[in-house]
Image (cartoon, rainbow, N blue to C red):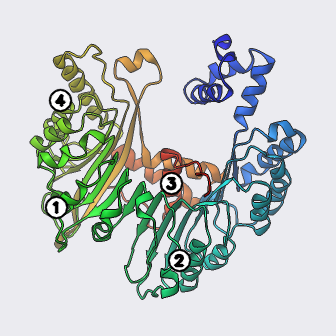
Amino acid sequence: MVDALQVLDTDIQWIILDWLSESSPKSLLSVALSSRSFYRLSKSFIYRIIHFRFNRRRRDVNKRLIKRLLADNDLSTQVREIRILWAPSANLPPGEGSKEDLELLGQALPNMTGLKIFVWDVQYPILPWLLDTLHTHHAQCLLYTRHPARPDLAQTLRRLYGSPCLFSLDVTLINGQFQAFNELQKVLNSAPNLRDLTVAFAFTNAPVSSSEQEEREPLLLRSLEVCGYQKNTFKLPVAWHLLERLSLDSQQHFLKFLPDFTGLKSLKLRVGYTDDSMPLSVALRELKRLEVLDLTGFICSVQAAKEDFWQNFGKTLIKLRLHEEQSPYRPSQRATLPYADIERIAKCCPNLRSLGLDLECSGREWPHEGLRSIANNFWFIVHLELNILIENPQHGHPTSPKATLGSVPEIWCYLWQQILSSRVQQGHPITTPRLMSLDLLAGSKQPISDLDLRVWQIDQQRFSFNISDRDDEARLGIANHVCTDVEALLSKMSSAGPPWNHHQELIMKTATERASNGPHIKMPSATDSEMVRPSSFWDRFDEDRFCYQRPDGC
């Protein structure tokens, strides 16, 4: 293996080492110890991405890491990406010890000649001298930065004026932050290389954009996500024909700019009923290059049952998710796709690799008929996401399905066996299913109070299944499964470092009990959302790796 690696390009070697680091750490160690050159390569591989966290447990690690880079210029040149993270769950007040650590990092930055990506996900403003260092020594570096709604948000945005490195910006604006709103518009007007923008608005009485700002040069965005958008508030001049990824919480704004979405490859949209003259199902037919489609809301308005609707772009689709939201004020059954529609979608989307659907559950047993329909039609699927809402749950009944760590493996085993049988019936030469992972959101809905049956609450939790890394187990369909909520909580709390305080212990204990006994067990009311669920910023950055090369002249 080592001899075969030596004849490959360095970039290819790094890809292989990346795979070994995740799937077989022992193999990575044996490669590193095989020769002096591979030891050097493996060491460079380890330092290519630096995670710089602000918490007590990582303080010494951060210092040793930066001092080693300062002492070895060759090693510094191998750094490709730096991530700086501080979150409320870090159990460390902002600024405590971080100034000295960042000053050490600032000394090492000029020698990192190979730096390509710099991520700032910190709960206080980005440091001016750090920006100056990036602009001076790494003008081609891509800066990813996320800023929540804080009182000093306007000051933070002001520091980003005219930054040539600013590539990805994620901002949340709440009521009263009108100054930050104005600063954001100035940043957008002076960011020549901004390609990824996420803005969340929570204004009750919103300001109105001035006419001067409406006439500026259009943004050359490749990705845009807007939540809480108001058409009289934030008029974005965007070169829509260049946009490749779009996420909106209203279909009306999507329909308004539809003729210009010629290059759109990914669309995430909250749909509903609208008075617009063009139905959404007709509008989507114009998207000839669409690869990812994620629709949430009243999906029945899309008229998904029509076969010609999917034939227009079904062959290009790689990922599809259709989710009908269940309103707590609408206790009737959630609308789900009939099995005939599932068959039509499978017929028109032969290249689909990821699928997300809702299923009905009577409350007496898991929806085997729906699972069988998915397995028979999507026998080629690689990743599956299911949202199962249990109607009329019977928590006290021993045969009633419960969304727990002990009961959900039945869904995976049934799916695997059904897909296996379907592939055999299809006469496929490889009978082993391609299914690698399953994301399951399961639970029930119940009235909030016995006195008021009109208002319902939904108790669900997430589980994830991943096929075993061992080939012999993978061929048998053996998968590792965890409660995703508990894993996310552990990930956030582990960065804080022990000892946990009483409230953190209570959160962890309750989450574990929910995973074992069911989501009807209530979490503590004052749960830190940053600690329980990773932010959408990291979901997008880690899963999709949205990173474009700058075109010449941009």
Per the model, the C-alpha gap separating discs 1 and 4 is 26 Å
Near-viewer residue (548 or 150): 548
Judged by depth in the image, the label closer to the viewer, 1 or 4, is: 1
Residue type pointed to by label 4? Asn
Residue that carries the numbered disc 3 in the rendered image: 534
**Residue sitting at x 34%, y 18%:** 476
Picture quarter with the C terminus: bottom right
Residue 301, which numbered label? 1
Label of residue 196 in the image? none
Q: Is residue 538 above or below residue 224?
A: above
Disc 2 on helix, strand or loop? Answer: loop
The extreme front residue here reads 553
State the mark number for residue 376: 4
Q: Amino acid at mark 2?
A: Arg
Q: Amino acid at mark 3?
A: Pro
Do tag 4 and tag 3 residues touch (Cβ < 8 Å)? Answer: no
Q: Earlier in the sequence, mark 2 or mark 1?
A: 2
Distance from the alpha carbon under mark 4 to that under mark 3: 34 Å
Q: Nearer the viewer, residue 469 or 178?
A: 178
Residue 528 visible to the viewer: no
